[in-house]
Image (cartoon, coloured by chain):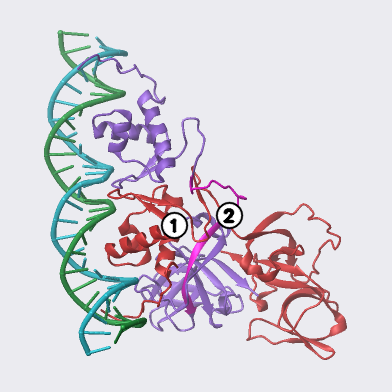
Chain colours: A red, B purple, C green, D cyan
Amino acid sequence: MANTESKRTSRRDPNKLSERQKKILVFIEQFLKRNGYPPTIREIGEAVQIASTSVVNYNLNKLVNGSYLERSPDVSRGLRLLKNLNNEPVEIEYTHEIRVIEASNVTPVPMLGKIAAGMPLMLPENHSLYPDPDEIVEVPSPLLGRYANSDNIYALRVQGDSMVDALVGDRDIIVVQRQETAENGDMVAVLLEDSNETTLKYFYREGKLIRLQPANTTMDPILVDARRVKIQGRVLAVLRQL
Amino acid sequence: MANTESKRTSRRDPNKLSERQKKILVFIEQFLKRNGYPPTIREIGEAVQIASTSVVNYNLNKLVNGSYLERSPDVSRGLRLLKNLNNEPVEIEYTHEIRVIEASNVTPVPMLGKIAAGMPLMLPENHSLYPDPDEIVEVPSPLLGRYANSDNIYALRVQGDSMVDALVGDRDIIVVQRQETAENGDMVAVLLEDSNETTLKYFYREGKLIRLQPANTTMDPILVDARRVKIQGRVLAVLRQL
DNA sequence: AGTTTAACCGAACGTATGTGCGACGAGGTG
DNA sequence: CACCTCGTCGCACATACGTTCGGTTAAACT
């Protein structure tokens, strides 16, 4: 009873997967990775919030139709994953630490250093190649938009709370596209030559001045002479692990 | 009765595997590769010529002792292979074509909805209202820490600026591990029952009270009765695309 | 010889789990 | 509007499957 909120999200497409089916597929994959054996119909139902086992069964058969799955009749947990949502093979490794190897669209980005309060970005301009990157962070390509395959991307670890007005906290990772110009509305890392410090702000050109607007709307913008601002790069994404 | 040929091949070794146990191990591995799910006790018995299910069970437990296997009690086919006879990890690929790509660790996470100001978290626990066409976001596993393979992870899109004190802005994506308890210092999504709104804060238990501490140190914490707080999940990561 | 123990057997038990069927509301269609 | 299909629900049923327990046998030890 209750609200019949979840309208059958009109899914009239023939061989396209419904949201539920997508979720089921993802769940099966996750479950498999975690447990080494496939879930039962009821386990799936619980995870995907389907009340009736028959509905799970129904959707499972849809997935079989789309050849995402194979099923063995009358066999408990008789599921065989054929591919995941992205038509990618799924490999599962049985080890103490279960590790998944799969293809995916991630872009490896070198972590080049830290960005801290009051310090200019210290980057070897001449970094022809990545100077033994401390680390490679793998960033989901969609997060990088059309710059996903650019070769002038690097990551920085934020140190300290000096970037809070950009909603960036201590230990966050920022992914930066190196460039010296910016368009209005871009989030940029800029060096303020007067105070000789680097900060993250939204960029707006206003005549001869540049307005640096914090992301946090409760804070006030800074207005500076365009000559005294040096753009270091455009921030493409922020990652934070808690 | 015939010849009692295979006499209990005097296996007096402590932690060494008997022939039967070796056969079982090999069979499980093969079965797994062939079917994508583990065999039942009876299937093992048939394959290895063991008449009684209890004997299979017995030997299975031996294998668990030698940490070749893990078992999930009361779960059909609840076997997890840890290593094979040669102490090698066992990889199983679920595909028609075998194609190994670059090893990269991403975890697909379902985007379950939005979290907005003054609104309780809309979770599939209660219903299945998914405002936006669902989406699967691929999150770099390292970002999820040890929860990378958990099956209770979901993503939410933040709507509005109500979470700024957690350094989370409009349109950010938060990745949440569903759980109802938390430890001090965790960043959690909590429902404040008095105001009936959900917020992101750092969690600290202080006796009968709970202190909800903003990430932004310039803001003040909230103190509330533990009874009036319902933890929705722990925030594992934040993603922001600019 | 008596005792212990590892390995095994058979059968019974209970529950974990897939399947089938009737019903219902929302769309779509003639 | 009658009629059909799709996605969903609830429920009952049969069986797939793990667990338990009494009992047996042979090797090892006292």
Q: Quadrant of residue D7?
A: bottom left
The spot of residue A85 in percent (x, y) is 49, 61
The spot of residue B18 in percent (x, y) is 37, 24
SS for tag 1? loop
Q: CA distance from mark 2 to mark 1?
A: 16 Å
The outermost residue toward the bottom is A207
Say which mark, if any, is on residue A85: none
> Is residue B33 located in the magenta-colored stretch of the structure?
no
> Is residue B111 located in the magenta-colored stretch of the structure?
yes
The spot of residue B211 in percent (x, y) is 47, 73
Check disc 1 and give the amino acid type: Tyr
Q: Find disc 1 in the rendering and name its residue.
A: A68
**Residue depicted at x 58% and y 56%:** B142
Q: Is residue A50 left or right of residue B242?
A: left
Read off the magenta span. B93-115
Quadrant (top left, top right, bottom left, bottom right) of the C terminus of chain B: bottom right
Q: Nearer the viewer, mark 2 or mark 1?
A: 1
Front position in the image: B17 or B49: B49
Check disc 2 and give the amino acid type: Ala
SS for tag 2? loop
Q: Find disc 2 in the rendering and name its residue.
A: A103
